Structure formats: structure tokens, C-alpha cells
Image (spheres, rainbow, N blue to C red):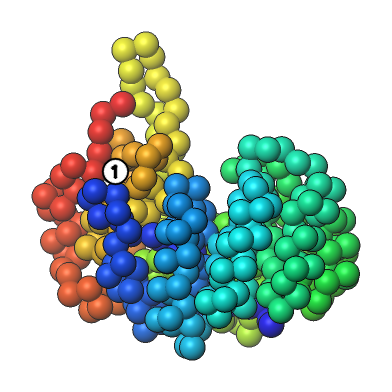
Amino acid sequence: MVFKGTYTAIITPFTETMKLNSDGVMSLIDFQVENGAEGIVATGTTGESPTLSWDEHIEVIRNVFDRVGSKITVIAGTGSNSTEESLRGTEESQQIGVRAVLLVDPYYNGPSSLEIRREYVEPIAQRFPDIQIIPYIIPGRTGTQMHPQDLAILSHKYVNITAVKEATGNYDNAKLIRKLSGNEFSILSGDDDRTFQLMTMPEIKANGVVSVASNVAPSAVRKMTDALNNGQIKEGENWASKLKPLFELVTVKTTEETYYGPVECKARNPLPYKTLMQILGMPSGPCRRPLGKITREGLEVILSKARYIYQNSPQILEPIETYFDVDLSERLYQDRYWQGLTYDY
């Protein structure tokens, strides 16, 4: 299986009582198919996998695969900080019909790169030779990292390890992956705001992106990656420039004033995008605890960037108006659409 282009790390929508919103899942993935996403990652970390039970994991994966598995690639997020859980999730995903899984490096446990290779990825690759295994390397969220050397060992040993989601934020790391794992190995950007550089740097030549921003702009992100994969650098750069404000919303940093002095507040994925999607009228619902709400300062950042996109590149958000039957000229400017989405520090 060749991995290239745009894969949406789909948001998991919840009801106000924090139950899975199955109808919302269907609506979001239909929107993705209609607007050009080449694949969907179901129950990845953007989908709040740490707070999903495994029964919920499988329910979402089954719903996504049954709905669109015959049309686009479905990648199941079965990564965990427990190899046994990942084995179980991968087995059940295989039974559903899924043929690719995403394995985030085990968070908190702190295994070495060697341990990640031998005690996590390798057992799964061995047991499921017909499943494509995509390691997901994001040390900023997991506190650990599989190094390019161990990834290269895996890629040369197992025919079902042909891609990586690279979110280290370190271009030298991506360069070494390309050098050691070869030109046939797929590097997928795990950072929307670094995708253009990863795909155009000659020592990397990444093949696409697992995108958060494509939850709201699948068509535009797809046009960017298509252009870059086709060597149309200026065209790709044009789309990257237009999408930049959305890419900057994956993490929203603000300085909040408290009685005891200023403090930095970092709203991390998926909180900013869930907030944006609620404003835009898309099914998303709240985040599960311990994630909560955006601050008022953070909301202003989200509104400012979304309004900039709407005013300067309206074609990016136009599919939302068409598909979800909403009026963004109201939703982005009338405060009734974001009441209750914030709290004070």
C-alpha cells in the first residue's frame, strides 16, 4: 500500500453528555469524502483516543470503515501505551476489514527507541503481516521517540512497514528517516504547518500529511498536497500560504492574567479545532476531560484567524456552508454562536 496525499485525522464528535455522536461521525466522514480526502485516520490522538474506551474505539472504527472503507483509505488509530491493548485493537480492526493502523509512540511509559521497536511495533507487525503498520513519532506529546535507525531496521525487515507519521518538528530527523529508509518509504507530515517544507525539502520529499486542518478544509489541503506531489511547487506554496492561519490553530498559545501574575496557557489539539468546528456549525461537541474549554483570549485568536480565511480565501471554507447548510457570515461574527465555549483563567 502506498501512502501519499491528504489523510484527515478525524475529530471524534461527542454529545453534550460526552457520549459518542455516531450521526456526527457519519456526517463528518461523508463531508471528507465529498471534498477529496484520500484517507481518514479514525480514533487517532486528534480523535481523543486516550479518553475513548476500547469498545468506543472499535465502534468508531467500524462506523467509519463501513461507511467509507470502499471509497477511501481508512487507517485505524490503535496505538497505546500498552502493547497488549494495541494488539487487541489491531486484531479487531483487521476483523472489521481495516488494512492499515497508526501506532503512536507509547506515551508516559518512557520506553527507549529500542524498546519501542522490539516490544511494541515489532510484535504487532509480526502478528499482523497483512496490516500496514504506520509508526507515529511525536515526542512533544509522548515524551519518548523511536529514532530513524530503529525505524529503518523495521522498514527493511517488514514489508508491512512502509510509512511513518513524522511529527518531531525536527527536519534533520526527517532527513535521516529518508536517508536510512529509502525513497520508496512514505513520510507523512504530522504537523500541518510543516507540511510544505517537509514535502519540498529535497533531502526529505515527504509524500503527504495526516492533517488536523483538513477536518474543516479537506479540499484545500488536498489541493496543496496534490500540487506538491505533482511538482507544482508554486501552486502548492500558494495553497500553503492561504491555509497558514488554519495551520496555526492546531495549538493556540495565549498569555493569561491572573491574580498572581501572567501565565502561559497552551490550548492543544483537538481543543482549538473542536471549538472552531462548533462555531462553524459542524458536529464536534466538547472535548472529554481532562481537556476542557478555550480561554476568552484563545477564542479571539480562533475567531481572528477563521475570519481572515473567510474574508481573504472564502473558497477554503465554502464547502462547509454548502454541506452543513450554515451561514458563516453569521456564525463567525455573532457571539451567540460561541456562548459557553470559553472559561476565564
Quarter holding the N terminus is: bottom right
Vertical comparison of 264 with 206: above or below:
above
User: Camera-side residue: 96 or 218?
Assistant: 96
Label 1 SS: helix
Residue at which label 1 appears: 299
Q: Is residue 235 visible?
A: no
Decide if residue 195 is on the left or right side of residue 287.
right
Vertical comparison of 267 with 216: above or below:
above
x, y percent for residue 141: 59, 43
x, y percent for residue 158: 83, 71
Question: Residue at the location (69% across, 74% down)?
Answer: 132
Quarter holding the C terminus is: top left
User: Camera-side residue: 214 or 60?
Assistant: 60
- Residue 291 lies in quadrant: top left
User: Camera-side residue: 255 or 343?
Assistant: 343
Decide if residue 195 is on the left or right side of residue 46.
right
- Residue 154 lies in quadrant: bottom right
Q: Is residue 253 visible?
A: yes
x, y percent for residue 16: 22, 50
Question: Residue at the location (44% across, 28% down)?
Answer: 264
User: Camera-side residue: 11 or 131?
Assistant: 131
Vertical comparison of 141 with 328: above or below:
above
The kind of residue on which mark 1 rests is Leu
x, y percent for residue 66: 43, 81
Vertical comparison of 88 with 7: above or below:
above
Question: Residue at the location (49% across, 72% down)?
Answer: 40
